[in-house]
Image (cartoon, rainbow, N blue to C red):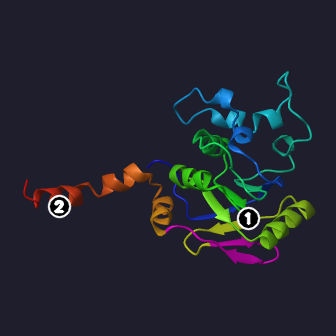
Amino acid sequence: MAYEKFEILKSTAVPLPVENVDTDQIIPARFLKATERVGFGDNLFRDWRYNPDNTPKADFVLNNPVYKGKILVGGKNFGSGSSREHAVWAVYDYGFRCVVSSFFADIFRGNCLNIGVLPVQVSAEFLDKIFKAIEANPETEIEVNLPNQTITLLESGDQESFEINSYKKENMLNGYDDIDYLTKMKAEIQDFAEARPF
């Protein structure tokens, strides 16, 4: 498997109510030298998390022990800017398995689905409910149900459906990337090729 299977995730969440978060803010360009998907989580939101002397910024949410979990809740237009895949590598490597927003940049959404981070797009109204629930209680649990394509605030029962491409949904449920998907069809592809004249 390319990454962990994603079926039903129940977790607290980290709120980042900032609009237009771009990929350079998610992972600054100076950290793009590596080609393997490891170690990027250390530099997730690097310039927002740390001062120039590498001391943590106390007022940034990832440095606040009150907030934790496998779900990152972002503002509208999350993941805009350059198409760097490393941005999602950083999100995944840090430990997030789901990002919730009211709008995602298309390339960022696609990179998420290729790497094993589920992008859940909700209405602006539901996003506001999530932020308010976390503000009232940082221990608020959210359930993201991929088979049913629903996201639920467990304490209140508020729920909304989300859309996902059926091919990408199957891959997420199985932990496949595009190469894994083709590999599992290897026998069928060989049979098809052998049945065709040169």
Image: magenta residue range: 150-165
Residue 191 numbered mark, or none: none
Magenta-span inclusion, residue 162: yes
Left or right of residue 154, residue 104 in this image: left
Helix, strand or loop for disc 1: loop
Magenta-span inclusion, residue 161: yes
Within the image, what quadrant is residue 182 found in? bottom left
Residue 144: where, in percent of width, then height? Answer: 66, 67
- Disc 1 marks a residue whose amino acid type is Ser
Q: Nearer the viewer, residue 155 or 74?
A: 74
Q: Nearer the viewer, residue 137 or 192?
A: 192
- Disc 2 marks a residue whose amino acid type is Phe
Residue at numbered disc 2: 192
Tell me the residue at 74%/66% (across/down): 142
Q: How many numbered discs?
A: 2
Instruction: Give the answer, above or below, for where 124 lies relative to 72.
Output: below
Residue 22: where, in percent of width, then height? Answer: 72, 45
Helix, strand or loop for disc 2: helix
Tell me the residue at 85%/21% (across/down): 53
Instruction: Give the answer, above or below, for where 21 lies relative to 137.
Output: above
Closer to the chain start, of discs 1 and 2, is: 1
Q: Which residue, as the protein is rendered here, is positioned at the far front?
A: 81
Tell me the residue at 77%/64% (across/down): 141
Instruction: Give the answer, above or below, for where 60 lies relative to 192.
Output: above
Tell me the residue at 61%/45% (across/down): 88
Q: Nearer the viewer, residue 7 or 75?
A: 75
Residue 102 numbered mark, or none: 1
